[in-house]
Amino acid sequence: MSIFKKLVYLLAVNLILMSCTGNREKNQTAAKDGETETARIVGKEISYQTDSDHMIGYIAYNSALKEKRPGILVVHEWWGHNDYARKRAEMLAELGYVALAVDMYGNGKQADHPQDAQKFAMSVMGNMESAKARFSQAINTLKADPHVDPEHIGAIGYCFGGSVVLSMANAGYDLDAVAAFHSGVQLPIMPGANTINARILVCNGADDPMITSDQVAAYKAALEKAGVDYRYISYEGAVHAFTNPEADKLGEKFELPLAYNEEADKASWEEMKKMLEEVFESKSFL
């Protein structure tokens, strides 16, 4: 190969590589109605803000879908808005939703130590007016995305994020479906009559020492008194953070009862998928 041809070849390779940078995008092939369609999952970082706080989020969607889709908020664990939350947003995009991984701490803050994580989480859960403002702005940001049908919004959350989405559902936010994973259930806003619009799914570890049986019983009783359509699942052998593959490493590092459980992770995701399909299928989306 001549030097000129080599230069042309290298230039072409560089152009291809450059075209794959920037927004995170990946292709998938999915079968639908006997045909093959290419799913292009696009993920991009976005900024939004309340009157006093600046947030850094991440929105993911399938650019091959032209019609507006239901939007799903993804609220992070107490570690903050990180790659794990973004991965879950991308997984929801693969299912046909538009997902926004939100930032409840502000400025994309992340914790490297449980003490910082606890401090950040308490600053949110101890100030519900600020938390509501941040959650409301996340909803508004998601609804404003051109790929989203603003009339059909759901939310999922992990650990701290599960407590957030359950609390916001209890506060009466207009959400169609809410799923919480390894979430606390002793919440700053508990279920009340005529306030919850969403269908609720809670997936927790049966052996999670951070969630007591008394707390679960009180939460279920409040849901039932309020007449909420809910399902509470306890996975045998699962402890806290069972959906996060990094849980074992973090548990060992900080001597915390955290552990990944692949079986419970996959089963809980399937339960969430089923609920979302049932909620949004009736609205002719899926």
Image (cartoon, rainbow, N blue to C red):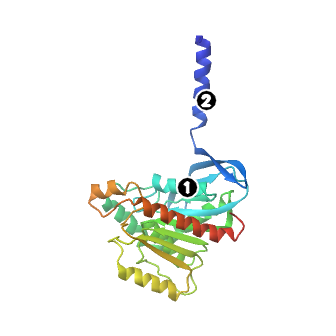
| Towards the viewer: 162 or 263 | 263
Determine whether, in the image, residue 113 is placed left or right of residue 125.
left
Q: Amino acid at mark 2?
A: Leu
Q: In the image, is residue 6 above or below residue 27?
A: above
In this view, 182 is above or below 65 = below
In x, y percent, where is residue 116?
33, 60
Q: In terms of image quadrants, where is residue 23?
A: top right
Query: In the picture provided, is 133 more to the left or to the right than 163?
Result: right
The quarter in which the N terminus is drawn is top right
As drawn, is 181 to the left or to the right of 255?
right
Q: Residue at x 40, y 62 (%)?
A: 242
Furthest-left residue in this view: 255
For this orientation, the residue located farthest to the front is 34
Residue 277: x percent and y percent?
A: 63, 67
Quadrant in which the C terminus is drawn: bottom right
Residue 236 visible here: yes
Q: Amino acid at mark 1?
A: Met
* Closer to viewer: mark 1 or mark 2: 1
- Residue at position x 67%, y 52% from top? 31
Residue assigned mark 1: 91
**Horizontal side of residue 124 vs 9, given as left or right:** left
Sequence-wise, which precedes: disc 1 or disc 2?
2
Residue at (51%, 58%) from the top-left corner? 54
Instruction: Please rate how many residues cluster around mark 2, counting C-alpha atoms within 10 Å: few if below 14, some from 14 to 19, many from 20.
Output: few
Disc assigned to residue 15? 2
Q: Secondary structure at mark 1?
A: helix
